[in-house]
Image (cartoon, grey):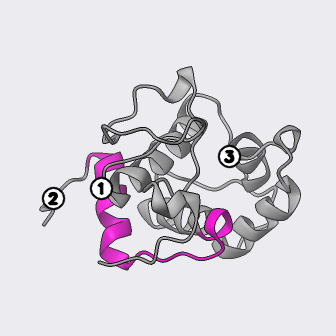
C-alpha cells in the first residue's frame, strides 16, 4: 500500500513516534538505517504498528495502566510538552469510553482501536488500511496466522 509520507512517524514507519530509549532498544523490525537521532525507524509500517501494540500491552501487563488517561499519560507525558489531556480525550472518544474508564487491551478489537487512535493523533491522520493494521497487531499479539 502506498502511503503519502508527510510526517516523521509515517516516513520512518514509526506512526506512534516512539522515541529511542533503553526501554525500547530491543524492539524488532528496526531499520538498519537509523537516521533520526531521537525516534526509531522501522523497516515496515507493520513493525512500527507492532511496536505501538507491544508497548501498550506492556503498559497494562507490567505497569497496570488501564484507562486512556493513564495510558496516554505515560505514552505522551505533558512533561515532554505533549497535550496529554486532549490526547487522552481523543483516544477515549475513539474507543467510546470515558478517559478514566478502564479498557482491556487484551481484547484485539480494543487494542486495534487504540493503536489507530494513537496513529491518528500522532500524525494528524490514520493512513493505513485495515489489513496493514491487522498484520501489525498480529505480530504484537502472537496471533500471526498467515501474513501475506
What range of the chain is rendered magenta?
120-142
**Residue 26 magenta-highlighted:** no
| Residue on which disc 2 sits | 145
Few, some or many C-alpha atoms within 10 Å of disc 1 (few <14, some 14-19, many ≥20)?
many
Q: Earlier in the sequence, mark 3 or mark 2?
A: 3
Tell me the CA gap for discs 2 and 1. 8 Å
> Residue 57: where, in percent of width, then height?
51, 42
The C terminus sits in image quarter? bottom left
Asked if residue 57 lies left or right of residue 65, the reply is left
Residue contact between numbered discs 3 and 1, judged by CB atoms under 8 Å: no
Q: Which mark is residue 66?
A: 3
Displayed quadrant of residue 46: bottom left
Q: Nearer the viewer, residue 68 or 119?
A: 119
| Residue on which disc 1 sits | 138
Q: Nearer the viewer, residue 81 or 54?
A: 81
Residue at (33% x, 78% y) in the render: 2
* Magenta-colored segment: predominant secondary structure: helix
Is 23 located above or below residue 50 in the figure? Answer: above
Residue at (79% x, 52% y) in the render: 69
Amino acid at each position: 500500500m502506498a502511503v503519502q509520507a508527510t510526517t516523521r512517524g509515517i516516513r520512518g514507519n514509526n506512526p506512534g513516534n516512539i522515541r529511542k530509549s533503553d526501554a525500547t532498544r530491543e524492539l524488532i523490525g528496526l531499520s538498519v538505517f537509523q537516521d533520526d537521532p531521537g525516534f526509531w525507524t522501522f523497516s515496515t509500517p507493520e513493525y512500527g504498528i507492532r511496536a505501538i501494540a507491544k508497548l501498550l500491552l506492556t503498559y497494562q501487563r507490567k505497569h497496570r495502566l488501564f484507562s486512556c488517561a493513564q495510558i496516554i499519560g505515560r505514552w505522551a507525558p505533558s512533561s515532554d510538552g505533549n497535550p496529554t489531556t486532549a490526547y487522552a480525550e481523543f483516544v477515549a472518544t475513539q474507543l467510546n469510553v470515558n478517559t478514566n474508564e478502564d479498557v482491556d487491551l487484551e481484547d484485539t478489537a480494543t487494542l486495534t482501536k487504540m493503536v489507530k487512535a494513537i496513529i491518528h493523533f500522532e500524525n494528524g491522520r490514520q493512513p493505513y488500511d485495515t489489513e496493514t493494521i491487522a498484520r501489525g497487531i498480529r505480530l504484537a499479539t502472537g496471533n500471526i496466522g498467515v501474513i501475506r
